[in-house]
C-alpha cells in the first residue's frame, strides 16, 4: 500500500483522521474524472481525499444520516460544492440507489462505506454515544428517527434487552446486566447507564474494556438498525458500480465485518452447471472479484496516532463484467 497523502501527526487533530486513508485510496484506485459515492461522509476526511484524487473533474456524492455531519462537510468542502464536484445528501445509506437516482449519479467508479460512529459524534456529549462523557441517552445518527437509546433501555422487557446485549454486543453477562438495568431504571444519561452496568457486573476488575462498551455498542446498533442497513446497502452499491468499479468497506466490529465478508464471498462465487443434478443444475456467474483476501488493517504509526484504527478492517472488491465465465 502506498504512502501518498501526508497524514497529520498532531495528536490534537488525530481524532478526526480518516482511518486507513491510503489503503482506501489504493483499494478504490481512484482516477481523475472518477464518479464516486461516499455513503458515510462523516467528518469529510475520506471525501476530501477522494475529491483530490479524482481532480480536476471527478464528482462525489456524499451521504450521511447525520444532519450535523452534512452541515459540517458543507462548510469544510464549500469549494468542491461550489464547483459542483460534490453533492451532499442527508439520508441513511440503505436508500443509496434512490438517492443516486435522484441526482442521476450512476454508474459510479467507486463506493466507500466507513461504518459506524464518527469521532465528532463520539466527542459530542449531547449525542449520547460515549459513556465517558455525560449526555442524554440518545445514540441516533439521525435525531429525527426513533427510538432513542433511552426508549430502549427504559421500556424494553428484560428478556429482549438481554438478547440485544448478547446478539449485538456479544456481551457474556447480558442477562445479569439486563436484570440489573430493569430493576434500577429509568436512566436518563450515558454516565448513569455506564455506572449501572459497572455495578451490575461487580466493577471493572482490571478489565481492558470498560464494562459498558458492549452494551453501548448493542444499543447503538439497534437504535440505528446498523446491521440491517449494511445488508441493504451492499447489493445496491454493487448495482450502482460500473463493471471494473470498486467497493471499499471499513468495519469496526465482527458483526459488521461478518456481513461484508460473507456477502463478498457469495458474490465472488461461481456456481458451475452440474449436468448430473436432478434438475440439470444451474449456472451463476460471479459478480465480484475480491481484492483483499484478508482484511486490510492499520499498521505502524497509524495505530499509535489513531486509536480508532485499531479495530478497523477494510475489504475491497471489484465489480466484474457479466460475461466473465
Ligand atoms: C466512521 S464515520 C465516517 C468518517 C468519514 N469517513 C471521515 O473520513 O470523516 C461514519 C459516519 O457514517 C454515518 N452513518 C453510519 N451509518 C449510516 C447509515 N446507515 N446511513 C448513513 N450514514 C451512516 C455516521 O453518521 C457517521 O457520520
Image (tube, rainbow, N blue to C red):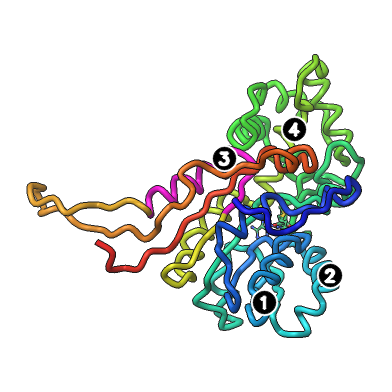
Q: Are marks 3 and 1 in contact (CB under 8 Å)?
A: no
Give the secondary structure at mark 4. Answer: helix
The C terminus lies in quadrant: bottom left
Q: Is residue 215 above or below residue 324?
A: above
- Which secondary structure is most common in the magenta stretch? helix
Number of other residues with Cα within 10 Å of mark 1, as a class: few under 14, some 14 to 19, many 20 or more? some
Using the numbered discs, state the Cα–Cα distance from disc 3 to disc 1 in whole angstroms: 35 Å
Residue 60 forms part of the magenta stretch: no
Seen at 76% across and 19% down, the residue is 207
Task: Residue 255: give its label.
Answer: 3
Q: Which tag, 3 or 2, sits closer to the chain's start? A: 2
The quadrant in which residue 27 appears is bottom right
Q: Nearer the viewer, mark 1 or mark 2?
A: 1
Query: Which region is colored magenta?
Result: 249-267
Q: Which tag, 3 or 1, sits closer to the chain's start? A: 1
User: Which quadrant of the render holds ligand 1?
Assistant: bottom right
Provide the residue designation for mark 1: 55
Q: Nearer the viewer, mark 4 or mark 2?
A: 2
Q: Which tag, 4 or 3, sits closer to the chain's start? A: 4
Q: Are marks 4 and 3 in contact (CB under 8 Å)?
A: no
Q: Which tag, 1 or 4, sits closer to the chain's start? A: 1
**Relative image position of residue 116 (x, y in whole percent):** 68, 50
Task: Residue 76: give its label.
Answer: 2
The quadrant in which residue 81 appears is bottom right
Provide the residue designation for mark 4: 213
Q: Are marks 1 and 4 in contact (CB under 8 Å)?
A: no
Mark 3 near ligand 1 (CB under 8 Å)? no
Using the numbered discs, state the Cα–Cα distance from disc 4 to disc 3 in whole angstroms: 15 Å
**Relative image position of residue 66 (x, y in whole percent):** 76, 62
Q: Nearer the viewer, mark 3 or mark 1?
A: 1
Using the numbered discs, state the Cα–Cα distance from disc 3 to disc 2 in whole angstroms: 32 Å
Q: Choose between 142 and 305: the one closer to the eye.
A: 305
Amino acid at each position: 500500500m502506498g504512502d501518498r497523502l501526508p497524514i497529520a501527526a498532531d495528536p490534537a487533530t488525530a481524532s478526526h483522521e480518516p482511518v486507513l486513508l491510503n489503503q482506501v485510496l489504493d483499494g478504490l484506485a481512484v482516477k481523475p474524472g472518477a464518479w464516486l459515492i461516499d455513503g458515510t461522509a462523516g467528518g469529510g476526511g475520506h471525501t476530501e481525499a477522494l475529491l483530490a484524487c479524482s481532480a480536476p473533474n471527478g464528482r462525489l456524492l456524499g451521504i450521511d444520516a447525520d444532519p450535523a455531519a452534512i452541515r459540517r462537510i458543507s462548510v469544510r468542502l464549500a469549494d468542491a460544492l461550489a464547483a459542483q464536484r460534490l453533492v451532499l445528501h442527508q439520508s441513511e445509506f440503505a436508500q443509496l440507489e434512490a438517492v443516486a437516482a435522484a441526482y442521476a449519479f450512476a454508474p459510479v467508479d467507486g463506493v466507500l462505506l466507513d461504518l459506524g460512529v464518527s469521532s465528532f459524534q463520539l466527542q459530542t456529549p449531547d449525542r449520547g454515544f460515549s459513556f465517558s462523557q455525560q449526555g442524554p441517552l440518545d445514540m441516533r445518527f439521525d435525531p429525527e428517527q426513533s427510538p432513542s437509546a433511552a426508549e430502549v433501555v427504559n421500556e424494553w422487557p428484560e428478556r429482549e434487552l438481554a438478547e440485544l446485549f448478547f446478539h449485538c454486543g456479544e456481551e457474556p453477562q447480558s442477562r445479569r446486566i439486563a436484570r440489573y438495568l430493569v430493576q434500577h431504571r429509568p436512566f436518563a444519561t450515558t454516565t448513569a447507564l455506564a455506572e449501572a452496568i459497572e455495578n451490575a457486573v461487580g466493577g471493572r476488575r482490571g478489565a481492558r474494556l470498560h464494562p459498558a462498551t458492549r452494551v453501548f455498542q448493542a444499543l447503538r446498533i439497534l437504535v440505528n438498525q446498523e446491521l440491517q442497513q449494511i445488508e441493504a446497502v451492499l447489493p445496491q452499491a454493487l448495482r450502482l458500480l460500473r463493471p471494473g468499479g470498486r467497493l471499499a468497506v471499513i468495519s469496526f466490529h465482527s458483526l459488521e465485518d461478518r456481513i461484508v465478508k460473507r456477502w463478498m464471498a457469495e458474490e465472488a462465487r461461481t456456481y458451475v452447471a452440474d449436468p448430473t443434478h436432478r434438475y440439470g443444475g444451474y449456472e451463476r456467474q460471479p459478480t465480484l472479484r475480491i481484492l483483499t483476501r484478508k482484511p486490510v488493517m492499520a499498521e505502524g504509526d497509524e495505530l499509535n496516532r489513531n486509536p480508532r484504527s485499531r479495530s478497523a478492517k477494510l475489504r475491497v472488491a471489484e465489480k466484474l463484467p457479466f460475461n466473465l465465465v
